[in-house]
Image (cartoon, helix red, strand yellow):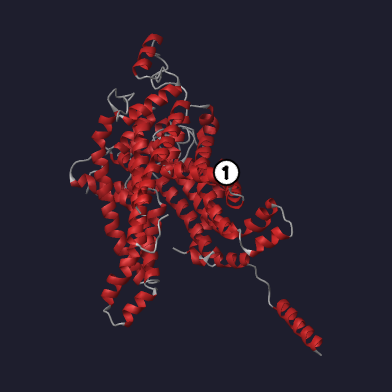
Amino acid sequence: MLRYVIRRLLLIIPTMFFVALITFSLAHLAPGSPFDRNENRPLPQEQLDKINRYYGIDQPIPVQFVDYIGNLLRGDLGLSFTRGRPVVDLIGQGIGTTAQLGVQALIVALAFSIPLGIVSALKQNTPLDYLSLLIATIGTTIPSFVTAIFLIYVLGASLHLLPFVGWGTWQHMVMPTFVLALAPGAFLTRITRASMLEAIRQDYVRTARAKGLREQSVIVGHALKNALIPVATIIGPATAGLITGSFIIESLFNVPGIGRLYVISINQRDYPMIMSTTLLYAFVIMIANITVDIVYGALDPRIKVS
Amino acid sequence: MATTAVSTRRQAAQHDLAARKQRSLWRDAVWRLFRNRAAIAGLAVIVFAAFVAIFAPIIAPYSPIQQNTPKQLMEPIWTRWFGSQFTDSGYLLGSDELGRDILTRLMYGTRVSLIVGFVPVAVIFVVGASIGMVSGYVGGWVDNLLMRFTDIIYAFPDLLFVIIIVATLRGTELGTAMDGLLLIFVALAIVNWVGLARLIRGQVLSLKHREFIEAARAIGATPVRIMIRHLFPNVLAPVIVSLAFAIPGAMLTEATLSFLGIGVRPPTPTWGAMINEGFIVFQATPWPVLLPAFCISIILLAFTFVGDGLRDALDPRMKI
């Protein structure tokens, strides 16, 4: 087990290296520099050279890459092209908000989807089951920005119940959190239902019934305990979904997190910001996936890690 | 005596076979699909959308980029009954902030959505299927390379990878071709072929030691023939299901990119771009945003219902 964990953790290094290489190559394949945006009033060449030297983009590309990796290892992510401030500071400013939004959304998703999935499985093929499946289908199919628009229209613009721009009070957090929770929540509902359906047909559940246990303890103590193991595995994909969801939700609701910053950086071609944020996201997702695999192995002794 | 008994039995068996109408597995699947009401409804929506997309230039009342300055931000015709002062019978669904007809732009937007749904998926199918087959059946360096590549791709969320490719290459020749559509095709294909290749690889690995493959090899079939004639038909069912879900996935990605402002270039109308542009005037009138949002929801649900129907029809055990 320990060897498996160490091997998985070591595998992060080459994967991160390639993620960095791909993002770096793509960013430098793009034509033009971020400083020639205004075509009517081009910067004088000597000033451009000075700026390029300041940001280190006058060097040959392989040298830049080696420098970048070196700086990365020392925790220096470079300067933002458009804001002129260290990328670390900018990410540090937004990461708290994004993490808070993500954790809130995850909690909401779990709180709604697990009970819904369980009830749906126990009442299979009843109207209640069909309703929850329909909600789950809509939640996984309709893009979050579309759901957000309908919510903003009804709750924000028409009924004036909730504010939909900015961040700070709990009222500001309600809509972004719920919209972000919708996609992972819908997916979790399907998984919970499927794995609960499988669990209640197992022999050990029949045995528990046969020895005369109360229905409640059969469901909670025997079926549910095993049904929730596969649910743990989707925390990995859910993290990825929350991250990509945060780009859209933060942009839409004007939440000052790194998702919104990322979208702005993309539109401004701010490559140090784009690269660093991408690497951060890839790292978080890899850690989430590894944690899931380890926890899964620990929860279910039938799974042999290899 | 004994021979007569055998031949009678054989005759009876043959008679039995002829009497029962033969039904292939595929026939059964089609039958199951057509009994699924949600899938049929989805199919009807898709056929309708395809009709609108093909005949958009004929049935659309205006040109999608024709601006009409005094008639900006008209509201849909039915809002008249709720007291809206800003309707015009020339604009059934209203107009956007530049006075362009929303109905026309929605019709043309159908084209982009459907093209983005089908073209990249066709590429994914060809690339993913061939590499997945070779990787699973032959193994070797192709397999190794595929697995390493998968490790890296899996560390990126799909959308993040697509965003990076599109955002960085937008200014290149590739990014400007076909109003930016070509780059979206390429990005979607690069990111998504891996999933299909892995699916097929897994299926092939579990099939390649079965008797029917061994039999084919024993009578001297070439590896290419085995892959095409024997393995491929047997992995087709999960492949169809996975592709059916890839189509709405690709459409969703295009809508998201256009919504973020890095998709198809304006003024080409796409539903995601319409939402992006309409959001600026959302406080004045919500319709330029609500109507394309509604269209996206309907078409994505339609494709998902068909995908669900196909999954249930092709393999009832795969049900989640």
Q: Quadrant of the N terminus of chain A?
A: bottom left
At numbered mark 1, what does the secondary structure look like: helix, strand or loop? helix
- Residue B107: x and y, percent? 50, 44
Q: Amino acid at mark 1?
A: Trp
Rate crowding at label 1 as few (under 14), some (14 to 19) or many (20 or more) other CA atoms within 10 Å. Answer: few
Q: Quadrant of residue A89?
A: top left
Q: Is residue B276 above or below residue A71?
A: below
Q: Chain of mark 1?
A: B
Q: Name which residue lies at 50% across and 27% down.
A: B172
- Residue B309: x and y, percent? 51, 62
Is residue B199 shown left or right of residue A173? right
Q: Nearer the viewer, residue B94 or A121?
A: A121
Is residue A2 shown left or right of residue B292? left
- Residue B49: x and y, percent? 53, 50
Q: Quadrant of residue A190?
A: bottom left
Q: Name which residue lies at 49% across and 41% down.
A: B104
Does the image show residue B73?
A: no
Query: Which residue is denoted by mark 1 in the rendering?
Result: B141
Q: Nearer the viewer, residue A278 or B52?
A: A278
Q: Is residue B259 above or below residue B11?
A: above
- Residue B62: x and y, percent? 51, 38
